[in-house]
């Protein structure tokens, strides 16, 4: 129930965590564990490094995207990163878009982010097997 921030072996601060608190990376794993539907919103407490605040991720839509020359049914997820801290906090209109496969594997396929220093783009280059329909 406590997050300790340690630098050079010394605890600089401690924050009491609310039940179910996640960080920006673990919320993506959490969302992948859920049965997703277009339009749903996932809300969890997030530890931004200094504060705990409610964070939301919207499952924007289900669509087919091309990854590695293959069509993949995918969910587009957009977490609200405005209070995420770090590089997102310094950005006026930060965005983070994540596409995960719309099958039982929920493979992260593509990430696009825009922050004050620029944008980055990550795309899966290889995955075992073929894209499969959810429930297959």
Image: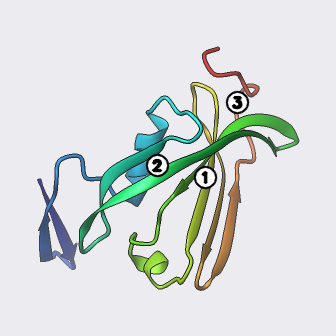
Q: Residues within 10 Å of mark 1 (few under 14, many from 20)?
A: many
Mark number for residue 85? none
Apparent side of residue 99 relative to residue 90 in the rendered image (left or right): right
Q: CA distance from mark 3 to mark 2?
A: 21 Å
Mark number for residue 28? 2
Residue at image mark 3: 128
Q: Quadrant of residue 52?
A: bottom left
Write the residue at 61% across / 58% down.
97
In the image, is residue 103 above or below residue 109? above
Q: Quadrant of residue 12?
A: bottom left
Apparent side of residue 62 relative to residue 11 in the rendered image (left or right): right
**In the orientation shown, which residue stands out farthest toward the top?**
136
SS of the residue at dot 3? Answer: loop
Q: Position of residue 18 (x, y in %)?
A: 16, 54
- The label nearer to you, 3 versus 2, is 2
Q: Residues within 10 Å of mark 2 (few under 14, many from 20)?
A: some
Write the residue at 74% across / 28% down.
131
Q: Position of residue 128 (x, y in %)?
A: 70, 30
Q: Position of residue 69 (x, y in %)?
A: 88, 42
Apparent side of residue 12 relative to residue 28 in the rendered image (left or right): left
Q: Nearer the viewer, residue 84 or 59?
A: 59
Q: CA distance from mark 1 to mark 3?
A: 20 Å
Query: Mark 3 or 2 closer to N-term?
Result: 2
Write the residue at 71% across / 23% down.
132
Mark number for residue 98? 1
Q: Please identify the quadrant where the C terminus is shown.
A: top right
SS of the residue at dot 1? Answer: strand
Q: Nearer the viewer, residue 59 or 72?
A: 59
Q: Do the numbered discs 1 and 2 sit on residues whose CB atoms are within 8 Å? A: yes
């Amino acid at each position: 129930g406590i997050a300790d921030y340690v630098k050079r072996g010394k605890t600089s601060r401690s924050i009491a965590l609310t039940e179910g608190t996640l960080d920006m990376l673990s919320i993506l794993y959490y969302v992948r564990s859920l049965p997703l539907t277009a339009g749903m919103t996932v809300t969890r407490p997030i530890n931004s490094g200094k504060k705990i605040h409610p964070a939301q991720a919207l499952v924007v839509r289900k669509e087919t995207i091309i990854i590695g020359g293959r069509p993949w049914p995918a969910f587009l997820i957009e977490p609200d990163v405005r209070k995420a801290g770090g590089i997102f906090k310094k950005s006026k209109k930060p965005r983070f878009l994540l596409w995960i496969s719309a099958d039982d594997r929920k493979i992260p396929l593509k990430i696009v982010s825009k922050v004050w220093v620029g944008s980055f783009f990550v795309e899966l280059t290889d995955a075992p097997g073929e894209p499969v329909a959810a429930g297959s």
